[in-house]
């Protein structure tokens, strides 16, 4: 006899309270749960049969003896009162709810639904439990042929390998995710967390199946080679390490796709997922990256058709609900994650362990000044491009790095997303460019950077753009990011004449940014926080940015009034000199519903283009922590600032107010959207009016 997809619960008998089979009977159970049954003779078995076969059976919380023998290849027993529990797990009440979706509160038969959350019991293992991950999830070595779904109808290979018991934990279907950890595990092929790709090992892109070269890591000299303008590491197919010459405005066709034979494990996962999705024409295959530090002196290439997600804990078998982006050292943790261990979740991408930029903080001005870390950046490097995360040169939209001539043969991305990373210690050095840049991130068209911390990157040369981020793509976005401690420095090295070095935090020619904080950045030239041309920019915070010129906050340049430059609901405070400055005020299309506190008066024409907001020299500090926010990067609003409820949701066509703020809380909490990246929970400002209302 075979019984499938059944639950035997809350039965009582002298013997075999769950199932009784006559002597000599054959019983096969598939996808069944045997829970909370009571034998009045406790030492008797809760299941009795002549021959018992169990395929994906869960036996828990019974008063009686669980089955014995060789029946647990795909099944498990736990929490039974009379021994024979195969695995020691917490299975009842609050402790059990850390392991299972909805366990019972007691052992043995109960009247009604005595479960932790109420309703029906569900002994589905939780991906957020490292104990359940170690004991149950992805633990079947020999899958049962023909048993393709669990008791609920979910696929049997969620997460890459079947789980023990009747339920599958909620993980992606096999073949839809490449799993990556810093050190890797098992076969290191990325098919599951148990076989995670080793992000810091070297992989051969042409190898099938994947195999890590454990003798070489991404910081090894044999992998790095002489990665400069004149030489390149071994097996680099595309000559990508050679920088452009900047003698003229055109360098001909730019066809470098940065294809290589040997890449880091993380890059290997990105390459394989992108190729799979591109062939399929969809985004089925993702890359999931566990917390840890991923170091690659050649950087990480953004590929089309792939979502790369960081912020997963680096233990257990986590699913999407266990992922927490924007948990990083140096930024304020959200209220709901205060107890989490940052080191388990922060997913760091870096060029090297040492920052290429030094910082000096001024206690009186609350501003920081940057300088080149000469122990990292030396002229012996030659002209060198080392952004941490970047699109390849073939995506450049102009004919060269100092050219304004548009290309028609650039590579257009359909869409790529990197979400949940700390991006640090990248640099551009001696590289003269006006249509390229970004020490941390370099983006052209079709890229979304989301829930990232971009910090301690530098662009140092005679003329450059963007210390943290360079973005030149109308359909590209920077969302929910902390852009902090990045710099563009005028450095007398490399090609070209000494000129402007602008956009310390970010240089955005085209693109959209919202819910982003730009703070404590520095530019030798204008736009210590951000330099914009024709971007869409709303609900951002620009604070405590410094400049060697007189525009520490935002600088805007465009020669086209119809270009689509838009600023809404943005907070300016504590920046050096002028909070806002424009190359030509006649082309500045206005800032709407903004809080603009400036150290020095901005130009009169610009002041006349500030609509429906508030402007003033050294306005009252809007932050909960006051000027301490400058070093804590905590720019949450205080309860008396003008920023509360003075934003607007009446945005131009095509611009949609985000549903949440940078803390992932509701974007509108009481009346109207707030100004800046944070929405304040204004409950402490709500007082009763003394009346009694009868409804």
Image: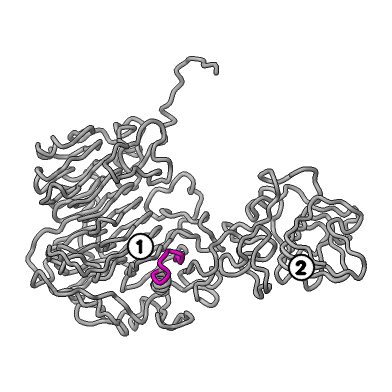
Image location (x, y in percent) of residue 143 = 66, 73
- Residue 88 on the magenta segment: no
Determine the residue positioned at 54% across, 68% down.
174
Determine the residue positioned at 46% across, 65% down.
284
Q: Secondary structure at mark 2?
A: strand
The numbered dot on residue 416 is 1
Residue in front for this viewpoint, 164 or 490 = 164
Q: Secondary structure at mark 1?
A: strand
Give the position of the C terminus as an image quadrant: top right
Kindly tell me whether residue 528 is visible in this rendering. Answer: no
Neighbor class of circle 2 (other Cα within 10 Å; few <14, some 14-19, many 20+) is: many
Given the current orientation, which residue lies at the most extreme left position? 497
**Quadrant assignment, res 467:** bottom left
Q: How many marks?
A: 2
Image: magenta residue range: 278-287
Check disc 2 and report the residue beneath it: 54
Instruction: Judge from the rendering whether residue 558 lies leftward or rightward of residue 199; answer left or right.
Output: left
Image location (x, y in percent) of residue 676 = 31, 41
Image location (x, y in percent) of residue 481 = 34, 52
Image location (x, y in percent) of residue 579 = 18, 43
Separation of disc 2 and disc 1 at Cα?
A: 45 Å
- Residue 284 on the magenta segment: yes
Give the position of the N terminus as an image quadrant: bottom right
Residue in front for this viewpoint, 616 or 13 = 13
Determine the residue positioned at 29% across, 67% down.
391
Above or below, 275 relative to 514: below
Instruction: Judge from the rendering whether residue 346 lies leftward or rightward of residue 232; answer left or right.
Output: right
């Amino acid at each position: 006899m075979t019984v499938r997809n059944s639950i035997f619960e809350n039965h009582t008998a002298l013997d075999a309270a769950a199932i009784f089979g006559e002597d000599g009977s054959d019983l096969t159970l598939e996808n069944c749960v045997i829970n909370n049954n009571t034998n009045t003779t406790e030492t008797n078995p809760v299941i009795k049969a002549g021959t018992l076969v169990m395929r994906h059976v869960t036996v828990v919380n019974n008063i009686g003896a669980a089955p014995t023998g060789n029946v647990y290849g795909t099944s498990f027993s736990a929490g039974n009162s009379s021994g024979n529990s195969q695995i020691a797990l917490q299975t009842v009440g609050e402790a059990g709810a850390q392991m299972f979706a909805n366990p019972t509160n007691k052992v043995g038969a109960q009247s009604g639904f005595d479960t932790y959350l109420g309703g029906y019991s569900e002994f589905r293992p939780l991906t957020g439990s490292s104990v359940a991950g170690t004991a149950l999830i992805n633990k079947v070595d020999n899958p049962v042929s023909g048993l393709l779904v669990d008791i609920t109808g979910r696929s049997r290979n969620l997460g890459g390998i079947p789980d023990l018991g009747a339920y599958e934990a909620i993980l992606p279907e096999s073949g839809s995710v490449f799993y990556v950890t810093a050190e890797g595990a098992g076969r290191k092929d990325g098919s599951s967390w148990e076989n995670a790709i080793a992000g810091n090992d070297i992989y051969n892109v042409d190898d099938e199946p994947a195999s890590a070269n454990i003798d070489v890591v991404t910081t090894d000299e044999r992998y790095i080679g002489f990665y400069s303008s004149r030489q390149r590491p071994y097996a680099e197919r595309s000559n990508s390490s050679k920088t452009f010459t900047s003698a003229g405005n055109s360098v001909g066709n730019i066809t470098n796709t940065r294809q290589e034979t040997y890449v880091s494990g993380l890059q290997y996962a990105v390459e394989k997922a992108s190729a799979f999705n591109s062939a399929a024409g969809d985004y089925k295959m993702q890359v999931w990256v566990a917390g840890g530090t991923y170091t690659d002196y050649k950087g990480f290439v953004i590929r089309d058709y792939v979502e790369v997600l960081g912020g997963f804990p680096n233990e257990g078998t986590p699913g999407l609900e266990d992922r927490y982006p924007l948990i990083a050292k140096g930024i304020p943790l959200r209220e709901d994650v205060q107890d989490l261990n940052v080191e388990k979740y922060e997913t760091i991408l870096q060029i090297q362990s040492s920052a290429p930029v030094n910082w000096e903080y001024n206690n009186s001005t609350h501003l920081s000044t940057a300088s080149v870390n000469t122990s990292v950046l030396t002229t012996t490097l030659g002209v060198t491009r080392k952004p941490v995360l970047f699109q390849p040169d073939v995506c450049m939209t102009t004919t060269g790095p100092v050219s304004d001539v548009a290309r028609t043969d650039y590579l257009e991305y359909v869409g790529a997303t990197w979400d949940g990373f700390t991006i640090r210690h990248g640099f551009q050095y001696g590289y003269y460019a006006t249509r390229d840049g970004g020490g941390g991130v370099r983006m052209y068209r079709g890229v979304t950077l989301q829930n990232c911390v971009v910090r301690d990157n530098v662009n140092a040369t005679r003329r450059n753009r963007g210390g943290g981020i360079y973005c030149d793509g109308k359909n590209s976005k920077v969302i929910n990011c902390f852009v902090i401690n990045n710099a563009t420095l005028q450095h007398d090295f490399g090609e070209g004449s000494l000129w402007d070095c602008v956009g310390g935090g970010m240089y955005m020619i085209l693109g959209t940014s919202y819910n982003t904080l730009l703070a404590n950045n520095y530019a030798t030239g204008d736009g210590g926080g951000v330099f914009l041309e024709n971007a869409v920019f709303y609900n951002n915070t620009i604070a405590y940015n410094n400049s060697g010129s007189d525009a520490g906050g935002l600088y805007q340049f465009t020669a086209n009034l119809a270009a689509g430059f838009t600023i809404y609901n943005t907070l300016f405070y504590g920046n050096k000199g002028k909070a806002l400055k424009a190359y030509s005020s006649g082309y500045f299309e206005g800032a709407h519903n903004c809080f603009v506190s400036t150290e020095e008066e901005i130009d009169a024409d610009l002041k006349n283009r500030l609509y429906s907001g508030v402007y003033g020299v050294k306005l009252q500090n809007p932050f909960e922590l006051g000027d301490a926010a400058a070093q804590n990067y905590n720019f949450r609003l205080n309860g008396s600032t003008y920023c509360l409820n003075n934003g607007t949701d009446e945005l131009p066509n095509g611009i949609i107010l985000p549903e949440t703020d940078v803390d992932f809380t509701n974007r509108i909490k009481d009346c109207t959207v707030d100004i800046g990246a944070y929405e304040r929970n204004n409950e402490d400002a709500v007082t009763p009016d003394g009346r009694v209302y009868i409804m």
